[in-house]
Image (tube, helix red, strand yellow):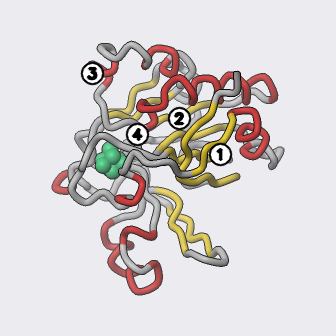
Amino acid sequence: MVVRLNVASTCVGTSALGPGFRSVVWVQGCPFRCRGCVAPEWIPDVPARLVGVEELAAELLADERVDGLTFSGGEPMAQAAGLAELARVARQVRDLSIVCFTGFTLAQLEERPDAPQLLSEVDVLIDGQYVRERDDGLGLRGSANQVVHHLTGRLADVGYDFEHRERTTEVRVGEREVALVGVPTADLLVRLAPVIGGPGRSRRTR
Ligand code: SF4
């Protein structure tokens, strides 16, 4: 049986969403409604791009420099089984680190029967919903309430400060949209609003 994911968008090769050179999957659909979410068009649980994990893995690894995957959204844990399979398939091709964002807390995930299979593939989990009042403009997490969990030691000693590093954001200009890849600061969003046409056109992980 082909395992499919409902994908909002992808990015092959970025330095803005974790250590190294990574490919990113943003899944479609999120059960949360965080105030200030910068990707509200990815909240509805509606069909977007339905793609098999084998095809998606090949796409994400097309650049041989890619050494990690980042899962964001939307809510990755809403598609935990599919993303776990994607991680397994991709790791059969190449040794990869996995970073995953989620609006659930790790304690909440322990109550979700489908979460452990994805957690077992994840090196770093960044958990909790985005709280605009606690967005301090630092780190790979969107707000200071979110917790960085090193579920393995793989990315613990690579010199990457997930909590306090200066944020970097890449601006990608496509034929039909301008997209931000990374965790932009609030100030950057304000300055780029005339270009990206408002938050709905940009991408930011929580
Ligand atoms: S910030 Fe993340 S968890 Fe919150 S509504 Fe947006 S996609 Fe969902």
Q: Are marks 2 and 4 in contact (CB under 8 Å)?
A: no
167 or 106: which is nearer to us? 106
**Earlier sequence position, callout 1 versus callout 2:** 1
- Of badges 1 and 3, the one in the foreground is 3
Instruction: Kindly indicate the quadrant of the structure image that contains residue 37.
Output: bottom left
Q: Are marks 4 and 3 in contact (CB under 8 Å)?
A: no
Amino acid type, callout 4:
Glu
For the question of whether residue 87 can be seen, the reply is yes
**Earlier sequence position, callout 2 versus callout 4:** 4
In this figure, which residue is indicated by the disc labeled 4?
Answer: 75
In this figure, which residue is indicated by the disc labeled 1?
Answer: 22
In this figure, which residue is indicated by the disc labeled 2?
Answer: 99
Disc 1 from disc 3: Cα separation: 27 Å
Vertical placement of residue 138 versus 141, above or below? below
Within 10 angstroms of label 2, few (less than 14), some, or many (20 or more) residues? many
For the question of whether residue 142 can be seen, the reply is no
In this figure, which residue is indicated by the disc labeled 3?
Answer: 108
**Earlier sequence position, callout 1 versus callout 3:** 1
Amino acid type, callout 1:
Arg
Q: Are marks 1 and 2 in contact (CB under 8 Å)?
A: yes
Helix, strand or loop for disc 4 = loop
Disc 1 from disc 2: Cα separation: 9 Å
Disc 2 from disc 4: Cα separation: 13 Å
Helix, strand or loop for disc 3 = helix
Residue at the outermost bottom position: 194
**Earlier sequence position, callout 3 versus callout 2:** 2
Amino acid type, callout 2:
Val
Q: Does mark 3's beta carbon lie closer than 8 Å to ligand 1?
A: no
